[in-house]
């Protein structure tokens, strides 16, 4: 039987999970668990580059992993682990950091944006994050990252690092590629031009664990476009188009059908039905979450076992890396 390709992905434990994280990442992860050998990581070290406080990071970590499992991620199929529990990520990162000129890292758009906003925010951690990310991927020799083709340029630094290592010391790393043609993108309820994220306040996103009343109130307040027609037109009616996208994802009703159904109704009825469809979609995940959350020790056990398993693979790769470089090993 041919070997399964290896996949690596991660998420930062920065707080509430929202439906953007779910449809844009976790649901994709769940869909590939059988086909690929998957490593899913709590990217806690990456979260240090932006978190203002680490006060609740343990709780956030447990909560995030609990939502993943409640949504359908299966620790028997996938390796679910904690980045900081596998020190080889940092070890490999410090070796890979020698392969690129700083000037190349300074071109990274995320770094440029952060420095443009606040020159003092440009820590070495932020400059170095693409190198740590390359280490996260390459330490497992992952050849696939579950992102869409449009995000593929984000992997270019990882590929460049893999190429440089392979060229200089001998080939051991694959050049990681994106896995999907397209991955759903969910937009903010209050800033329809921007991706849904926690940075625009809690009214701008639907959290996976929001109560039905909270969901109703957030959808009721969601920004709409001028004119009452419920029509998919991402240029002229971005807000309503993005709500239609969410409606399709939670109900699996094709957008054309939704347009016909709400042709003569106003926003109120449309939003009311959308809220109920989101509530119904999230109900089984929330139910499972509440069951799992009663036993946080079980979640920690899953993370511990996953991290031990990940570490074995990471140690094997590090031994190979050191051997290729020619370092003395005992
Ligand atoms: P982060 O919170 O930046 O660690 O993101 C975790 C994952 O969720 C990444 O794979 C993101 O691409 C995905 N994600 C976050 N926000 C959205 C969104 N609004 N729509 C789709 N995917 C998202």
Image: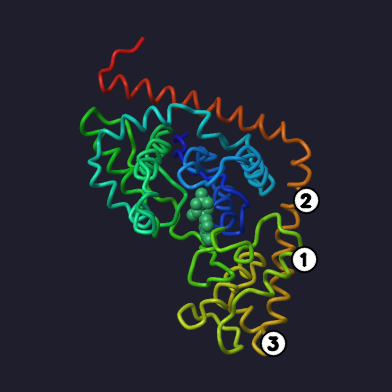
**Distance between the Cα atoms at labels 2 and 3?**
32 Å
Picture disc at residue 265: 3
The Cα atoms of the two marked residues, 1 and 2, are separated by 16 Å
Residue 327 in view in this figure: yes
Tag 2 residue? 287
Give the residue at mark 1. 213
The local crowd at label 1, few if under 14, some if 14 to 19, many if 20 or more residues have their Cα within 10 Å, is few
Quarter residue 241 falls in: bottom right
Q: Is residue 246 above or below residue 67?
A: below
Q: Which mark is residue 266?
A: none
Name the element at disc 2: helix
Looking at the picture, how far across and down is residue 193, in whole percent?
48, 71
| Residue 179 versus residue 316 in the image, above or below | below
* Foreground residue among 66 and 4: 66
The secondary structure type at the circle numbered 3 is: loop
In which quadrant will I find the C terminus? top left
Q: Position of residue 327 (x, y in %)?
A: 28, 17
241 is higher (above) or lower (below) than 320: below
Is residue 20 rendered to the left or right of residue 170? right
């Amino acid at each position: 039987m041919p070997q399964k390709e290896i996949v690596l992905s991660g998420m930062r434990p920065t707080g509430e999970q929202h439906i953007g994280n779910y449809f844009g990442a976790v649901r994709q992860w769940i869909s590939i668990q059988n086909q690929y050998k998957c490593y899913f990581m709590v990217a806690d070290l990456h979260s240090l580059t932006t978190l203002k406080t680490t006060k609740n990071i343990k709780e956030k970590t447990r909560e995030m992993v609990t939502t993943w499992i409640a949504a359908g991620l299966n620790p028997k199929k996938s390796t679910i682990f904690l980045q900081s529990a596998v020190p080889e990520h940092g070890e490999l990162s410090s070796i890979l950091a020698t392969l690129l000129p700083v000037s190349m890292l300074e071109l990274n758009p995320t770094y440029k944006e952060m420095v443009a906003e606040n020159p003092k925010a440009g820590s070495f951690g932020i400059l170095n994050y693409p190198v740590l990310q390359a280490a996260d991927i390459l330490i497992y020799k992952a050849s696939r990252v579950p992102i869409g083709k449009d995000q593929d340029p984000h992997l270019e630094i990882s590929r460049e690092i893999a190429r440089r290592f392979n060229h200089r010391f001998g080939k051991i790393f694959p050049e990681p590629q994106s896995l999907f043609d397209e991955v759903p993108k969910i937009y903010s309820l209050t800033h329809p031009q921007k991706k849904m994220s926690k940075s625009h306040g809690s009214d701008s996103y639907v959290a996976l664990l929001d109560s039905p009343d909270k969901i109703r109130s957030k959808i009721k307040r969601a920004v709409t476009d001028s004119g009452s027609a419920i029509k998919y037109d991402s240029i002229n009616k971005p807000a309503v188009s993005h709500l239609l996208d969410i409606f399709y994802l939670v109900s699996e009703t094709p957008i054309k059908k939704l347009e016909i159904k709400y042709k003569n109704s106003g926003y109120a009825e449309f939003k009311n039905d959308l809220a109920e469809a989101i509530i119904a979609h999230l109900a089984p995940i929330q139910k499972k979450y509440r069951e799992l959350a009663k036993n946080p020790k079980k979640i920690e056990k899953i993370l511990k076992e996953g991290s031990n398993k990940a570490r074995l693979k990471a140690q094997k790769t590090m031994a190979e890396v050191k051997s290729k470089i020619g370092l003395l090993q005992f």
